[in-house]
Amino acid sequence: MSSHDISEDNLPQKQAHAHGALGVADKDNPFADPGLPPHEHRIQDVDEKAAKRSERIVAGLFTLSMLATIGFIASFVALPVDKIVYIFPLGHVSALNFALGMTLGVALFAIGVGAVHWARTLMSDVEVAAERHPIEASPEVRAQVFADFKDGVTESGIGFGRRKLMRNTLLGALTLVPLSGVVLLRELGPMPGTKLRHTLWSKGKLLVNMNTHEPLRPSDISVGSLTFAMPEGLHEHDHDFQKEIAKAALMLVRLEPEDIKDKRELEWSHQGIVAYSKICTHVGCPISLYEQQTHHVLCPCHQSTFDLADGARVIFGPAGHALPQLRIGVNDEGYLEALGDFAEPVGPAFWERGES
Amino acid sequence: MKKLSTRRRHPLAAIVVLILALAATGGLYAAFAPAGEAQAEETAQSLAIDEGKKLYTVGCASCHGAGGQGTSDGPTLVGVGAAAVDFQVGTGRMPAQQPSQQVPDKKTIYTQAEIDQLAAYVASLGAGPAAPTAEQYDPAGADIANGGQLYRTNCAQCHNFTGEGGALTHGKYAPDLSEVDPKHIYQAMLTGPQAMPVFPDTVMPEQEKRDIIAYLGAVNGEDSPTPGGFKLGGYGPVAEGLFGWVFGLGALVAVAIWVAARTAKAKKS
C-alpha cells in the first residue's frame, strides 16, 4: 500500500458552491445549509477608475516607506547623538532618537497599510469554501498498521516469554542514562563555602561614612538621621567593591535609648546609635526607606517592613528574619567601630542557614 | 626698667595684661561701634519675635501648644529651628488642613516676611538649624556627577532615581521633587520633615547637599532632556511595560478591529 493513494474523500473539496444557491428549510430538513449569500462586488471590481486610484494609493504608501527608510539612513548619518530638541508634546528629546523612531515607524507602518489596502480593494475577494477532510485514516490502513506492529512485537521476542532478560536490561539501561546529567549538576561551580556567613566587618573596623569617606563619630549622627557606612579599608574603586558592599552595607540611625524596646538591640547600640544590615532578609534588595517618625524601614521590592526600634523585627511582608544588627562601640580615639561581624548571615535565607 | 622686668614674671602679670587688653578693646568698641544700628537690629529681632508670636498664637498654637511644647495633635517645636519653619510654612504644609498620615504641600498662605517672623519666634524657643542663606543652596558650579552618586546612595530609595517620588507605608509617600525650590530641598535634608530622615551637615556636608540639588536640577528640571521622550514618571521598566502592553497593543487591536469592521463592498449593508 502506498501513501500516495489518498482517496478523493480525504482531499479538500473543490470550490463547489454556486453563489446564491440557497438551501431552503422544509419539513424534512429544518436546518438546511443556507449556503453563502450572493457575492457583492466592490467599487474597484466594477469601476476601473477606482481600481486605478487604489493602485496609486498602494504604490504611494510603498513609496512613502522607501522615502522613510532613506530618511532613517540620512538621519543616522547626519544627526549628532547628543542633540536635544524640543518637540511638543514629548518635551526635550534626543533629535536622533526621535528621527530614527519616526522614520522606521513610518517605513514599517506604510508597508503594512499598503498591504492591507491592496488586499482589501484589489485582490480577489470571492468567497471560497474549503471543507476539512476527516483526520482518521481509512479502516484498511489502520488494520494494516496494527498488524505490522503486532508482527514486530512477535519477531523481536520482547512480548512473550523468551527474551525477557534482554527487555528488562534495556529498560534498566534507559533508566540509568539520565543519571549522568543529574550527577553533572553537582559541578555547576565552586560551592559557596562560608562566604554567605561572613562579611568584611570584624572587631575594631571603623565605620566609614559613604558620603564623605571619613570615619564616623557618635556626635556626627543626630536623632532622626540616616547614615550609610562601609567598613574601613574598602574603597569604591576596589575590584571587589560591589561584591563586598553587597554583604557589608550598613545603615546607621540614632534613636532615643528609651525608645529601644529590644534588650539585645540596646546592648549592641552606642548611645542610641544602632547599626543594621541594609540587605533585606527576603530576597536581598537594598532596603533603606527609613521613616524617622515610626522607626520603620520599608523594602521597596515586596513591602517587607522592619521596626528598627524593636530589633528590626518584621512587622509586615514576606521577610522571614529580622535584619541582622552589627554590634558597635567607640574606640580610644572616639570613632565608631564594629565590635565583630554580624552574628548571623546577612540577606536572604538559604538551605543551610539554620535558625537564629 | 629693672622693676618691670622682675615683675613681669609675677604669676598675676598675665591676668593684669589680659584685663588691660580687654579694657582697651571694650573702650575702642564703645567709641567706634555704630551703637544705633546694633540697637536697631536687636529691636528689629525682638519685634520679629513678637510679631511671630502673634502669628503663632493664631495659626499654630492649637496643635503645637501655646509655647510650642507640642500637644497630642502636633509635635513640639522647641529646637526645630528656623529652617524647619521656613520649609513647613514656605511649602504650605503648615498650617495643616486636617490630621492625616502625611500633610501634603499646598498654596502658601503666609508672606515670606510673616514666615520669617514665625521662624524667628520658633527659633527663639530653642536652638535649631537656621534658615540657609542663598549661597548655601545655590547649585551653580556644583558637581552634578558627584551629586548623582550621593543622591543614589541617600535619596533614591524613596524619591526615585530622578526624584519623581514614591510610595511608603500606610499612605505615606516621598514627594515628587521636580517642582521643589532648591531652598526647600536643602531645608528638607537639614531638618527631616515628617517621615523623612535628617541628613545633618556632619554626615552630609553643605557642599554635598549643593551637589545633590545640582543633580536634581539636571535630571528633574523643567528643561531636563528625556532622550526617549515620554518618560512616564521615570518609574522604570514596569511603567513602560504597562504602557506598551495597554496602549501600544491596545492601539494595534483597535486598528485591526477598525480594519475588519469596515466593509469594502460597493453597496453598504
Image (spheres, coloured by chain):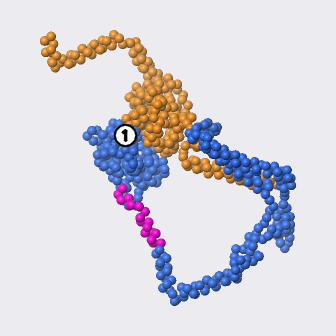
Chain colours: A blue, B orange
**Residue A79 on the magenta segment:** no
| Front one among A219 and B244 | B244
* Quadrant including the N terminus of chain B: top left
Instruction: Give the x, y percent position of residue A343.
Output: 33, 52
Residue at image coords 58%, 38%: A83
| Front one among A283 and B80 | A283
Residue A107 visible (yes or no): yes
Q: In this rendering, would A53 be left or right of A207?
A: right
Q: Which residues are magenta?
A: A178-195
The vertical placement of A303 against A20, above or below, is: above
* Quadrant including the C terminus of chain B: bottom right
Instruction: Give the x, y percent position of residue A291.
Output: 44, 42
Q: Label 1 marks which chain's residue?
A: A
Residue that extends furthest to the bottom in the rendered view of this protein: A162
Name the secondary structure under disc 1: loop
Residue at image coords 56%, 39%: A82
Instruction: Give the x, y percent position of residue A318.
Output: 46, 54
The vertical placement of B124 against A110, above or below, is: above
Instruction: Give the x, y percent position of residue A158.
Output: 54, 85
Q: In this rendering, would A270 be left or right of B205?
A: left
Secondary structure character of the magenta stretch overall: helix
**Residue A182 on the magenta segment:** yes
Amino acid at pointer 1: His
The vertical placement of A57 against A16, above or below, is: above
Residue at image coords 39%, 49%: A239
Q: Which residue is mark 1?
A: A213
Q: In this rendering, would A163 be left or right of A239?
A: right
| Front one among B165 and B65 | B165
Q: Residues within 10 Å of mark 1 (few under 14, many from 20)?
A: some
Residue at image coords 75%, 77%: A7
